[in-house]
């Protein structure tokens, strides 16, 4: 069984989505991503309402995670890192990226429509700008290459931490 995500039944984000957009909820109480995407496609303002309700929950969960962390390096996966201003709270920023045609093919293969992808991309900072702002960029064209780059980035972060200590 896959781990429960914030969109699983009973989770705070799922409860918020259920209150705001009951049509996006499955019979078991989980969030239907396809239905939610359809609502956003029909009315882009839905995304603003969703973000306003869910982002504070995500920020609280992130703060609790960081407070409990015992590792020397903690990774945060924040899709809208720059757009939400969260980059300022990070010691280093890693952008994971692929060329636009690969990104498109991967999104469509996961069931997203072209229109849904365009709505999401329109809300995001362009990839080139994210790359320019990042401390590290990891391209994910090939898994082996990406894994090797992750190891390089971790080693670099550890070197910097040791130097700055």
Image: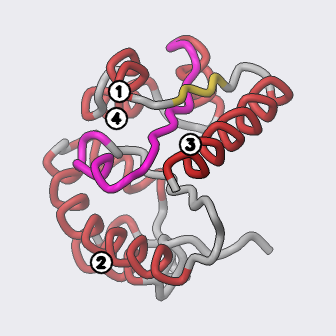
Q: CA distance from mark 2 to mark 4?
A: 20 Å
Query: In the displayed structure, does residue 53 sit left or right of residue 165?
Result: left
Q: CA distance from mark 2 to mark 1?
A: 32 Å
State the residue at coordinates (18%, 44%). 43
Q: Position of residue 136 (x, y in %)?
A: 53, 29
Dot 4 falls on a residue whose secondary structure is: helix
The residue pinned by badge 1 equals 133
| Residues under numbered marks 3 and 1 in contact, where contact means CB atoms less than 8 Å apart | no
In x, y percent, where is residue 61?
Answer: 41, 76
Give the mark nearer the N terminus: 1 vs 4. 4
The image quarter in which residue 153 lies: top right
Rounded to the nearest angstrom, the CA distance separating label 3 from label 1 is 18 Å
Q: Is residue 71 left or right of residue 63?
A: right
For label 4, count other residues whose C-alpha is less than 10 Å away and answer few (under 14), some (14-19) or many (20+). some
The segment highlighted magenta reads: 82-100
- Badge 3 is on which residue? 160
Q: CA distance from mark 1 to mark 4?
A: 20 Å
Mark-to-mark CA distance, 3 and 4: 34 Å
Label 3 CA crowd tier, 10 Å (few <14, some 14–19, many 20+): few
Q: Earlier in the sequence, mark 2 or mark 1?
A: 2
Q: How many marks?
A: 4
* Coordinates of residue 107 in the picture (x, y in percent): 56, 31
N-terminal of the pair, mark 3 or mark 4, is: 4
Cβ atoms under marks 2 and 3 closer than 8 Å: no
Is 96 placed left or right of 145 in the picture?
Answer: left
- The correct choice, above or below, for 158 with respect to 126 in the image is below
Mark 2 secondary-structure assignment: helix
Q: In the rendering, which numbered label is found on residue 120?
A: 4
* Element class at badge 1: helix
């Amino acid at each position: 069984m896959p781990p429960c995500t914030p969109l699983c039944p009973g989770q705070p984000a799922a409860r918020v989505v259920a209150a705001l957009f009951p049509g996006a909820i499955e019979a078991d109480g989980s969030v239907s991503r396809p239905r939610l995407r359809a609502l956003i496609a029909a009315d882009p303002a839905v995304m603003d309402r969703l973000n306003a309700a869910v982002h504070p929950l995500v920020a609280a969960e992130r703060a609790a995670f960081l407070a409990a962390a015992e590792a020397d390096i903690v990774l945060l996966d924040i899709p809208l890192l720059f757009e939400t201003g969260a980059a300022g709270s990070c010691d280093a920023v890693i952008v994971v990226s692929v060329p636009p045609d690969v990104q498109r093919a991967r999104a469509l293969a996961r069931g997203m429509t072209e229109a849904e992808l365009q709505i999401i991309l329109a809300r995001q900072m362009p990839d080139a700008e994210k790359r320019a702002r990042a401390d590290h960029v990891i391209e994910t064209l090939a898994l082996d290459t990406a894994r090797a780059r992750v190891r390089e980035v971790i080693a670099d972060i550890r070197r910097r931490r040791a130097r700055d200590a």
